[in-house]
C-alpha cells in the first residue's frame, strides 16, 4: 500500500510540473492487463493523459519507439508532450474515451471496421517488420500452452492424459503450420475494439502497440474481426474478411493463389491461436494476478474456439476434448485465487 501511495504522489507531482499547474488532479482513465495505467487530467479546457509505466515492470521505451514509427507511417497514435523515462511517466495526447467496443453497432460497424482495416493496411504496407522480434514457432507454441495449464488444469481441475496430450499437440500443430505458411508483416498483436478509439481526425486512434512482432498477415485481422469482446454473425464477418483480402490483393501483399477459401482458413486458424491462448490467459489473469475483469468475456472466447474448430475435420478431436470437460460448466465462476 505504501508503495502504491508513493507512486501516486510521484505521478501527481510529475504531472503538475509537466503542465505547470500546482492544482491539477488526476482521475483514472483506463488500465490494461499489464502494470501500465493511464490517468486523465484537465487544464484550460483541454485534457491530457498521463501514462504511468513503471520502468522495472513495463519499460516505456518500446512504446515510445513504436509510437514514433507508427505516426510516421500515417497512423493516429497518441502524440507525446513530455516524458520522464527514469520514473516511467509520459504526458500524451488524450484520444478520448469512445472505444470501438462502445461505438460498434449494426449501423456503425461497416464504416468503423472499414476505417480500422484501412489503418491496418497502412501498418502492413508501410511498417518495416524485418527488425521486429519474430512471431516464432516458440512464441506460437508458448501461447497455445497457456490454455492446458490455466483453463484445463487450474480452472477445470483436469490434467490431460497422454492420449489427450496427443490430441492437443495435433491441434496445436495444425494451428502453428497455418500461421507459418502465411506472409510475414508487422503485427500489432492486440488490434481489437478495446485498443481502437473513434476519433475525428484520421480514425481510428490506435493504442497498446508496444508488443509488435513480425508475424502472420492475418493475425491482426483475426484480432479485429474475431474480437473476444464483441461478436458478429459469421456471414457478416466473412464479408469483412473478403473485403480485406481484396485490399491485400490491391496492395500486392498477396497474389491470386490466396483464394477466398485459403484466406478464410488463414483467418480462422490464426484466430484459433489467439483464442486458445486467451482462453488460458484470462484465467491466468485471475488466478495468478488477481484481475477478474476479463472473466465475463470467457464464454465468447470459448464459443469462438469451439465453433471455428468444428469447421475443420482435423480439429474434431480437439473440440471433443474441450466439450468433454467444459460443457455444462459456468466458465465465469472461479475458485479463490
Image (spheres, grey):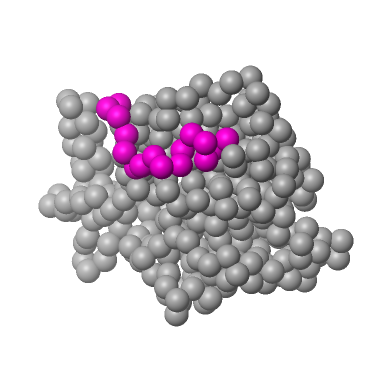
Task: Using residue 183 as the reference point, say whether residue 274 is left or right of it.
Answer: left
Point out residue 104 in the picture as x, y percentages from the top left corner.
43, 70
Residue that lies at the very extreme toward the left in this rendered image: 23
317 or 5, which lies in front? 317
Q: Main secondary structure of the magenta part?
A: loop
- Compare residues 49 and 245 and report the one nearer the observer: 245
Task: Give whichever of 313, 203 is nearer the camera.
Answer: 313
For the point 22% across and 26% down, which residue is it? Answer: 3
The quarter of the picture where the N terminus appears is top left
Classify 256 as above or below 31.
below
Q: Is residue 18 left or right of residue 74?
A: left
Q: In the rendered view, would you say 55 is above or below 113?
A: above
Q: Position of residue 238 (x, y in %)?
A: 63, 67
Q: Nearer the viewer, residue 281 or 81?
A: 281
Q: Magenta span covers which residues?
A: 321-337
Q: Residue at 56% of width from left, 23% of height from top? A: 160
Left or right: residue 320 versus residue 254 is: left
Quadrant location of the C terminus in the rendered image: top left
Residue 3 visible within the image: yes
Residue farthest right in this picture: 257
Q: Is residue 329 magenta?
A: yes
The image quadrant that residue 70 belongs to is bottom right
Q: Is residue 86 above or below residue 295?
A: above
Which residue shows up at 46% across the image and 38% down it? 326
- Residue 122, magenta (yes or no): no
Amino acid at each position: 500500500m505504501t508503495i502504491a501511495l508513493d507512486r501516486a504522489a510521484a505521478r501527481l507531482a510529475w504531472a503538475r510540473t509537466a503542465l505547470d499547474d500546482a492544482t491539477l488532479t488526476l482521475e483514472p482513465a483506463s488500465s490494461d492487463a499489464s502494470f501500465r495505467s493511464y490517468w486523465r487530467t484537465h487544464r484550460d479546457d483541454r485534457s491530457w493523459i498521463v501514462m504511468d509505466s513503471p520502468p522495472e515492470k513495463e519499460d516505456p521505451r518500446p512504446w515510445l519507439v513504436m509510437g514514433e514509427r507508427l505516426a510516421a507511417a500515417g497512423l493516429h497514435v497518441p502524440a507525446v508532450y513530455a516524458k520522464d523515462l527514469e520514473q516511467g511517466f509520459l504526458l500524451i495526447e488524450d484520444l478520448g474515451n469512445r472505444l470501438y467496443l462502445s461505438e460498434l453497432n449494426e449501423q456503425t460497424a461497416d464504416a468503423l471496421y472499414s476505417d480500422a482495416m484501412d489503418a491496418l493496411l497502412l501498418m502492413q504496407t508501410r511498417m518495416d517488420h524485418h527488425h521486429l522480434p519474430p512471431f516464432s514457432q516458440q512464441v506460437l507454441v508458448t501461447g497455445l500452452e497457456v490454455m492446458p495449464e490455466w483453463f484445463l488444469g487450474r480452472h477445470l481441475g483436469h490434467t490431460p492424459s497422454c492420449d489427450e496430450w496427443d490430441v492437443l499437440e495435433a491441434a496445436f500443430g495444425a494451428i502453428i503450420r497455418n500461421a507459418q505458411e502465411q506472409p510475414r508483416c508487422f503485427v500489432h498483436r492486440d488490434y481489437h475494439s478495446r485498443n481502437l478509439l473513434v476519433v475525428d481526425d484520421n480514425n481510428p486512434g490506435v493504442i497498446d502497440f508496444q508488443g509488435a512482432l513480425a508475424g502472420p498477415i492475418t493475425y491482426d485481422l483475426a484480432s479485429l474481426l474475431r474480437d473476444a469482446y464483441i461478436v458478429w454473425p459469421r456471414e457478416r464477418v466473412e464479408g469483412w474478411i473478403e473485403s480485406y483480402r481484396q485490399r491485400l490483393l490491391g496492395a500486392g501483399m498477396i497474389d491470386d493463389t490466396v483464394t477466398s477459401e485459403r484466406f478464410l482458413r488463414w483467418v480462422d486458424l490464426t484466430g484459433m491461436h489467439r483464442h486458445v491462448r486467451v482462453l488460458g490467459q484470462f484465467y491466468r489473469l485471475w488466478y495468478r494476478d488477481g484481475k477478474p475483469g476479463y472473466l465475463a468475456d470467457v464464454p465468447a472466447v470459448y464459443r469462438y474456439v469451439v465453433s471455428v474448430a468444428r469447421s475443420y475435420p482435423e480439429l474434431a478431436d480437439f473440440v471433443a476434448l474441450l466439450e468433454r470437460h467444459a460443457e455444462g460448466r459456468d466458465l465465469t465462476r472461479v475458485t479463490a485465487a
